Image (tube, rainbow, N blue to C red):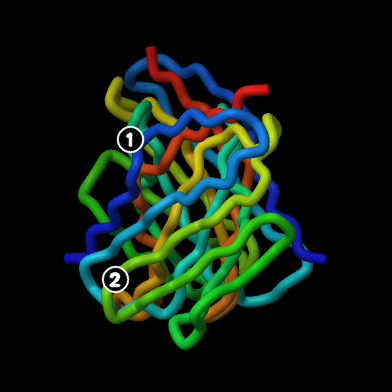
């Protein structure tokens, strides 16, 4: 059974700091890994998608890496801003029955202090 | 461009009442559709997914059911709500196995 773990559960940093969020998964038979952002009371916003054959993806100040063999992914946020404050979720996509499903970690709640 | 609509945004229902949450996707055809629930302080739990009209797979036994009457419409229902059905319900879609998943804005359901 696939299990996705995110460390730390919460993180508070001063504005301008670079930071790394961690995601690990137990079953390497994934099709892709996706990082999301969730603001309080809102839906999920997709940040980055990494295919299983890829090592990393970048979008602006965000960089996500994937090491499928070791079951790890990291989300790197450069020069953090108060607007980055949110919960960050990683999810792996796996084949299941006749379709597939995203399996989520519990999230990392990030607070960036001005 | 593709968009996903989910309504209502909030809902307060008494125990034992029925439920119908609707999700529609625009700008694509034959999407995979998903219903997730997020309980307070917990992660997202997959409830149902569908790879086509009339094809529904259930992840966990529960008081809920799902239907897909049209290609881009996914409905979450219950005949009689329980207190434990309270939570944040999210609809999502993607196209195939390797594409990005997109989520709706969610429905906050409170059963009283």
In this figure, which residue is indicated by the disc labeled 2? A71
The location of residue B17, given as percent across then percent down, is 40, 23
Q: Residues within 10 Å of mark 1 (few under 14, many from 20)?
A: few
Q: For the N terminus of chain B, give its image quadrant.
A: bottom right
Q: Chain of mark 1?
A: B
Q: In the figure, A99 relative to B69: above or below?
A: below
Q: In the figure, B64 relative to A86: above or below?
A: below
Camera-nearest residue between A77 and B6: A77
Asked which quadrant contains residue A23, the reply is bottom left
Q: Chain of mark 2?
A: A
| Horizontal side, residue A26 vs residue B1: left or right | left
Q: Residue at x 70, y 63 (%)?
A: A59
Q: Residue at x 34, y 67 (%)?
A: A72
Distance from disc 2 to disc 1, alpha carbons, whole Å, reads 22 Å
Give the number of the mark in front: 2 or 1.
2
Identify the element where label 1 is drawn: loop
In this figure, which residue is indicated by the disc labeled 1? B42
Identify the element where label 2 is drawn: loop
């Amino acid at each position: 059974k696939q299990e996705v773990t995110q460390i730390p559960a919460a993180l508070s940093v001063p504005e301008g700091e670079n930071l790394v969020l961690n995601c690990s998964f137990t079953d390497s038979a994934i099709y892709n890994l996706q990082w999301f952002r969730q603001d309080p009371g809102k839906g999920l916003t997709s940040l980055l998608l990494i295919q299983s054959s890829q090592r990393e993806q970048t979008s602006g100040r965000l960089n996500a890496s994937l090491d499928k063999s070791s079951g790890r992914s990291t989300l790197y946020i450069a020069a953090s801003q108060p607007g980055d404050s949110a919960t960050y979720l990683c999810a792996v996509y796996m084949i299941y029955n006749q379709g597939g499903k995203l399996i989520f970690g519990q999230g990392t709640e990030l607070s960036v202090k001005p | 461009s593709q968009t996903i609509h989910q309504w209502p945004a909030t809902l307060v229902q008494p125990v034992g009442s029925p439920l119908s949450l609707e999700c529609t996707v625009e700008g694509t055809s034959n999407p995979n559709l998903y219903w997730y629930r997020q309980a307070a302080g917990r992660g997202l739990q997959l409830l149902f997914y569908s790879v086509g009209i009339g094809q529904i797979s259930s992840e966990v036994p529960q008081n809920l059911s799902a239907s897909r009457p049209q290609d881009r419409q996914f409905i979450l229902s219950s005949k009689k709500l329980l207190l434990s059905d309270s939570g944040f319900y999210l609809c999502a879609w993607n196209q195939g196995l390797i594409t990005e998943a997109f989520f709706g804005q969610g429905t906050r359901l409170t059963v009283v």
